[in-house]
Amino acid sequence: MQQRPSIGRLMKVAALFSLLSLSSPGGGAWLGITVQNVSAQMAFQLGLGASSGVMVMMVQEGGPAAQAGIRQGDVIVKLNQHNVENNDELRDLIAKLSPGSLVRLELIRDREEIAISIQLGQRPRAAA
């Protein structure tokens, strides 16, 4: 009988996929974060009004998000006044931008809404 992967393992895989995909194609604009979609259960536990947005699971040291003060546990709800419903939507919004673009993220931190401006970086090339 084949074992199902644990929820924790699936979350790690999803977070890694998000890190690899949260940039525009061809080494374009980059935030330097891993994210996870906010589920209804997470929204309830965090006291959020809705189960939309993405939770920051990891901030890459020295990346654009780290330089701007984004923290693990922040919930991103808007990018440049566009609602962010899930990680696919965030990735698509970033894909339309160029490295060096200044973006405004609206997020929830410790149950308070805050806005942070971030200059997108150039996605690092993977070592061969």
Image (cartoon, helix red, strand yellow):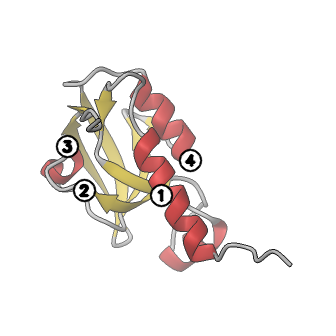
Judged by depth in the image, the label closer to the viewer, 1 or 4, is: 1
In space, the residues marked 3 and 2 are separated at their CA atoms by 9 Å
Which numbered marker is on residue 86?
A: 4
At which x and y percent is residue 82? 47, 34
Looking at the image, do the residues carrying marks 4 and 3 touch, with CB atoms under 8 Å apart? Answer: no
Q: Is residue 37 visible?
A: no
Residue 74 lies in what quarter of the image? bottom left
Q: Residue at x 32, y 24 (%)?
A: 28
Residue on which disc 3 sits: 64
Label 3 is placed on what type of residue?
Pro
In space, the residues marked 1 and 3 are separated at their CA atoms by 18 Å
Label 1 is placed on what type of residue?
Ala
Judged by depth in the image, the label closer to the viewer, 1 or 2, is: 1
Q: Residue at x 41, y 34 (%)?
A: 81
Earlier sequence position, callout 1 versus callout 2: 1
Judged by depth in the image, the label closer to the viewer, 3 or 2, is: 3
Residue on which disc 1 sits: 15
| Callout 4 secondary element | loop
Earlier sequence position, callout 4 versus callout 3: 3
Q: Is residue 29 above or below residue 74?
A: above
Earlier sequence position, callout 1 versus callout 3: 1
In space, the residues marked 4 and 3 are separated at their CA atoms by 20 Å
Residue closer to the observer: 77 or 126: 126
Residue closer to the observer: 44 or 127: 127
Q: Is residue 40 above or below residue 113?
A: below
Which numbered marker is on residue 70?
A: 2
